[in-house]
Image (cartoon, helix red, strand yellow):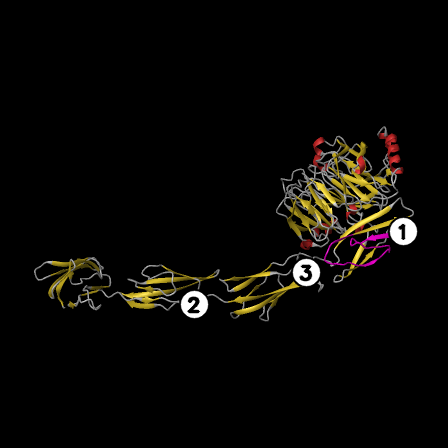
Amino acid sequence: MIINQISMAFFPGKPTIFRLLTALVLGSPFLSFAQQDSYWYFGKKAALDFTVSGNLPVPRVVNNSSMETNEAAAAISDNSGSLLFYTNGVQVYNRNHGMMPNGDGLMGDNSSCQIAVVPQPGSDSLFYIFTTDAFENDFMKGYYYSVVDMSGDGGLGDVVIKNVPLWPSCTERIAAVRHANGTDVWVITNDQNSNIFRAWLVTCTGLQAGFSVVSTVGEIMDQNPLMNVGVLKASPDGKFLCQTHFPFNDANSTVSNFIQLFDFDNASGVIRNPRKISPPATQYNHCEFSPDSKLLYLTRKGSKQLDQLDITLPAVADIIASRVTLPTINPYYDIQLAMDEKIYLSQGNSQLAVINFPNVRGTGCNFQRNVINLNPGTAYVGLPSHINDIVAANNQGNGFTFTILDSCTGKVQFSSSPTLPGTLTWHWDFGDNTSSGLQNPLHDFPDPSLLYTVKLTITSTASCGKLVRSRIIRPSGMIKPKAGFTPVFICDSNYIRFTNTSTDTAQPGIRFLWDFGDNSVSGQVNPVHTYALDGNYPVKLKIITGNPCNDDSVSYMVSFSQFSIDVTTDQTIHFGETAGLNTDVAADNYDWSPGKWLSDSTIRNPVATPYEDITYTLIATRGTCTATDTVRITVIQNDYIYMPTGFTPNSDGKNDRVSPLINGRITLKEFSIFNRNGERVFTSSRTGEGWDGRVGGAIQNAGVYVWVLKAIDFNGNLISRKGILTLIR
């Protein structure tokens, strides 16, 4: 590792520029301007608002952006969270979304992975925009910077210094890291095709462009052109740097690229202790640290995965072994920590994913797809770049921490232990129209369930200005979950599946307790339960959060009734007889199959007159449940022909017609009746159709008649019969 100073003589004309900067500094109020990240502007006219406003969600989609960019993006707000300007490294837009004067034609490229916007410490109006060239231009332009003065253009801002060369050799990587003193900012660049890093310091007197801290450390990144494409991210505590590069051929999943993890001394600007992390068959694109600086998240666009590594482990092998891989389904690109202490991921369209609890190890980090719809905006690839202390708790003592003492009453203990020199004064703004001047105040919030933006301003007599840090907190410690469930009876197995519909339960430490009302309980999220007896049961779901104030429960009466069907037992009948089919179980619908020889196949108790053996299946439904049972009817086939010897057609309903009784498997071909004169008075080939003693409607005389019958037996043989019968009146 080599540390030295770089002369400013490489670029002619610098003294004139710095005289202008000096004039701007001396003419501004003596006030530090801390990084504010309340608004994100990025992608194709995409924007988010992270300010807290009552019960409104955080963040909220904003549809007023004028900017389009593939990757490079940054936005800056004032200490009250009001938007100042945003940029893609080529154009600069003011808070009214118009182009700033002199705000077009910056030397960056909107396809660069990163840019940096750095407020000048000690000034409320001066901001540096650091740009880098892109792979598409072969990195010919190098690193540049421009300066915005917010006092220009009536307070909308003006680009007063534009396109000053910083260093000619560049990659798409650049990072802004808060100095250990809590006010200054390191801007870290990375020379092309090398392992050279340069840390440039921005102080109360502006950019110290006459020198940089040079660290030659880690792998020489010259194996392929895409090794100059990637990101350089700093951990929120300022102790670590992560360097990624894009895989040269991400279509080949068996080829690994690597990331490098470095230690960073944010007091001296020195980078040391390189660790090359290269799990097998793994190709990383972007990285981001957890708010507590203990975990590292890396996107794997090609394999559609997200990795989590524990960087607190000392050995590289242990860090790799700690890997937790989360399937993402979609390919994710940039990944960025936000001031709400969540991490957001872009996927090249209008949807953003989120890691809700990035400090939690493993799947408890709660990665969720498609959480934010930016429509009509689109995230494309990149997300906004920020100074590393976007989370105020981890800037080596120059932020603040808090402890929730009573989430029921909203009692919170705040603590600040800054490293600023000199005599300090504190001003706390709790976001509820109250404040405090104590170093470590104890505060009661009026509604613990709401979000509050707590802002700490520290003034030092020995510093160039004020240190301002903000955090979004919820005094209850979590969003109060709402319990709910739906029971679904699974008919084929006679159990009930309980689906947990509770909201806001993907928070660390939440447990569930089910009471099924029959002295049985469960701690599963979506349990399955079988009741021994039919009946109505009071089922209760309780959400246990670890704090009774945040617990919730819900109870429903659940009716359980096993649904099965039984039909009449198997029957044996003689040919020509009927069989009654029936079930004692009530149902919504009945379907007897086949419907052959049934009086009605859709009723509960049809009558069957089968000619031969048959099995009937009943399919019954009740609600969403279905049950079946079968019954077999056996038909005794008596193959005979019987002809009565007389009949009395007097319309008394008894014996009014005469016909042969044909049983079994005999098929009638002809049945005819003749009078004593040999005249045929009746004929039919239909079984069961008989003569009523009339001819053409005329009543025939009583007496003796002759009948003739022809039929075919089951073997196809002809049967011929004849005889006499008497018509009695």
In what element is the residue under mark 3?
Answer: loop
Query: Which residue bears the numbered disc 1?
Result: 424
Q: Which residues are magenta?
A: 425-453
Task: State the image coordinates of residue 67 (x, y, percent, origin top left).
Answer: 70, 37
Q: Is residue 542 visible to the viewer in this orientation of the structure?
A: no
Q: Which mark is residue 510?
A: 3
Dot 2: element = loop
* Residue type, label 3: Ile
For label 2, the crowd category at 10 Å Cα-Cα, with few meaning under 14, some 14 to 19 and many 20 or more, is: few
Question: Quadrant where the N terminus lies?
Answer: top right
Q: Give left or right: position of 333 versus 388.
A: left
- Give the amino acid type for the residue marked by disc 2 in the picture: Val
Q: Nearer the viewer, residue 646 or 181?
A: 646
Which quadrant of the structure image shows residue 348? top right
Q: Residue 98: give x, y in percent of width and height.
A: 73, 35
Q: Position of residue 692 (x, y in %)?
A: 18, 63
**Residue 371 versus residue 694: which sits nearer the camera?**
694
Q: CA distance from mark 1 to mark 3?
A: 41 Å
Q: Is residue 613 above or below residue 421?
A: below
- Inter-mark Cα distance, 1 to 2: 84 Å
Left or right, 314 with respect to 376, comes to right
**Which of the marked residues, 3 or 2, is nearer the chain's N terminus?**
3
Residue 125 lies within the magenta run: no
Quarter of the picture containing the C terminus is: bottom left
- The three-letter amino acid code for the residue at tag 1 is Leu
Distance from Cα at disc 3 to Cα at disc 2: 44 Å
Name the mark nearer the viewer: 3 or 2. Answer: 2
Report the residue marked by disc 2. 585
